[in-house]
């Protein structure tokens, strides 16, 4: 949670009106004008600074809030640097090209989107990280979709859906551990309980992806052209699988994400050098600028030109701005006043769950950070669930269903910005097809009454 105390106490009506103004501004610039999200977020910061000045808040307090907000995302920012390196090192080591080549050999046009969803979900559970899953197997799948000339938006929706299914259901996931810990629920009891809503959402999503999958994609000759170009790139080796296996082992042994990504990148880099494909100066250049495909087949070059620290700077700069924006929402009292208003208006069980979900979603929209959506919502509603006679598992499940999976659907959120950058598909393009993420909060509200677990509300 932001270590920020509000310096002003606005009414909830004033807070709501101001939020509608700011969200409307951001939406207009991104959707209506098609600008990069940095611009409206920065304008939102200017508006909040002006609002703070009008309410008598000193610039020092406003500046401190912005810094505290940005500081809360430093863990993610360090990981973004490493993921940029991971993608580029997995390119030069042949790991991603090899996965794409193998995928062409296994997957045909039948049920393509459904298979992408299912495989990404399995990898997501194994790795426990939606972002790592997206940056590895997701990049491979989006490349295959591009080669097969199928919808990149639907493919990205399937990747995001599968990655965040894994993020919810994996005992290795940070958000899963956070949601269970914040309300004091055993981790595996939490996973068992969220399956009540997660499994139906998975099944419905899988069926939809089956129906959306094209009956036929491209000719086998076209796929052969891609496979031949991948082989001619000189990046396909048996050792290319080692970095993937190493990453899975790191995850299994609960190695911290920073260490796992760094060490996996170093392993991939070593094999890139060992295979005599790259010199050390070339490798360090790829670490920063990413890999550039140099085959005679331009579609494969576009497929392989990815990664590098430089590719993450867009994402990192937006995350810093968005979290600074969130810090200002706290210091001006806007978010605290709305949270208190929500608490005062809860009257029954369904309203409790609906309000919890709305708060988690709203926090994602306003701050763009899934960890804060879980922390803030969990701390705010913990006492209310006890008072209403609802189990702690009901709260931890709602935090996951409406907090974790909504973040990738917000264009200026940490996950949304990262995924759009890595996959090359904008959030607004894949959002309608991220069925699992869209269904999860709906199902948790519809079946909220099941959360009583035999208790009678007070």
Image (cartoon, helix red, strand yellow):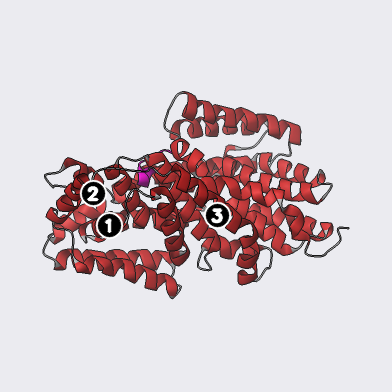
**Viewer-proximal residue, 56 or 231?**
231
Count of all numbered marks drawn on residues in the image: 3
Q: Quadrant of residue 100?
A: bottom left
In space, the residues marked 1 and 2 are separated at their CA atoms by: 8 Å
Q: Nearer the viewer, residue 395 or 11?
A: 395
Q: Is residue 4 visible?
A: no
Direction from residue 69 to residue 306 in the image, left or right: left
Q: Position of residue 369 (x, y in %)?
A: 54, 49
Quarter occupied by the C terminus: bottom right
Magenta stretch in the rendered image: 421-426
Query: Quick one: label 3, few (<14), some, or many (20+) residues within 10 Å?
Result: few
Residue projecting furthest to the front: 215
Sequence-wise first label, 3 or 1:
1
Circles 3 and 1: CB atoms closer than 8 Å: no
Which of the pair 274/258 is nearer the observer?
274
The residue lying at 42 percent from left, 62 percent from top is 123
Instruction: Say whether disc 1 or disc 2 marks the residue closer to the N-terminus.
Output: 1
- Identify the residue shown where x is 24% and y is 59%: 98
Residue tagged 2: 304
For residue 423, side relative to residue 268 (left or right):
right
Say the numbered circle drawn on residue 96.
1
Please tell me the numbered disc located at residue 203: 3
Whether residue 367 appears in this view of the structure is yes
Mark 3 → mark 1, Cα distance in angstroms? 28 Å
SS at circle 2: helix
Percent from the top left, x then y, of residue 425? 38, 40
């Amino acid at each position: 949670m932001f270590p920020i105390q509000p310096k002003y106490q606005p009414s909830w009506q004033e807070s709501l009106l101001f939020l509608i103004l700011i969200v409307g501004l951001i939406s207009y610039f991104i959707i209506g004008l098609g600008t990069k999200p940095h611009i409206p977020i920065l304008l939102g910061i200017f508006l909040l600074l002006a609002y703070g000045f009008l309410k008598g808040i000193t610039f020092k307090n406003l500046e401190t809030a912005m810094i505290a907000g940005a500081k809360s995302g430093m863990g993610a920012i360090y990981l973004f640097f490493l993921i940029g390196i991971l993608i580029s090192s997995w390119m030069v080591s042949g790991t991603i090209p090899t996965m794409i080549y193998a995928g062409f050999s296994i997957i045909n046009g039948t049920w393509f989107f459904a298979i992408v969803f299912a495989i990404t979900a399995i990898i997501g559970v194994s790795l426990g990280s939606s972002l790592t899953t997206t940056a590895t197997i997701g990049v491979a799948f989006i490349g295959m979709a591009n080669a097969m000339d199928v919808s990149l938006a639907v493919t990205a929706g399937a990747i995001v859906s599968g990655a965040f299914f894994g993020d919810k259901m994996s005992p290795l996931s940070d958000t899963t551990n956070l949601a269970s810990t914040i309300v004091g629920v055993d981790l595996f009891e939490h996973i068992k309980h969220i399956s009540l809503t997660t499994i139906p959402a998975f099944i419905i999503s899988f069926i939809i992806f089956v129906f959306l999958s094209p009956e036929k994609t491209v000719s086998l000759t076209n796929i052969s052209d891609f496979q031949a170009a991948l082989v001619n790139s000189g990046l396909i080796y048996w050792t290319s699988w080692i970095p993937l296996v190493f990453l899975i082992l790191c995850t299994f042994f609960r190695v911290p994400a920073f260490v796992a990504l760094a060490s996996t990148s170093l392993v991939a880099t070593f094999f890139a050098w060992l295979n005599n494909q790259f010199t050390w100066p070339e490798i360090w250049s790829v670490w920063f600028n990413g890999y550039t495909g140099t085959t005679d087949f331009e579609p494969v070059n576009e497929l392989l030109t990815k990664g590098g620290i430089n590719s993450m700077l867009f994402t990192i700069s937006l995350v810093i701005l968005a979290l600074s924006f969130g810090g200002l929402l706290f210091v001006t009292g806007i978010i605290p006043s709305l949270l208190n208003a929500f608490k005062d208006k809860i009257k029954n069980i369904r309203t409790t769950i609906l309000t919890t979900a709305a708060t988690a979603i709203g926090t994602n929209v306003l701050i763009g950070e899934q960890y804060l959506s879980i922390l803030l919502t969990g701390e705010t509603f913990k006492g209310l669930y006890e008072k209403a006679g609802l189990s702690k598992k009901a709260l931890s499940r709602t935090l996951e269903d409406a907090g974790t999976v909504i973040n990738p659907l917000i264009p200026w959120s940490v996950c949304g910005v990262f995924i759009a950058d890595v996959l090359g598909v904008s959030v607004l393009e894949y959002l309608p097809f991220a069925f699992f993420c869209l269904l999860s909060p709906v199902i948790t509200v519809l079946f909220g009454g099941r959360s009583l677990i035999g208790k009678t509300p007070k």
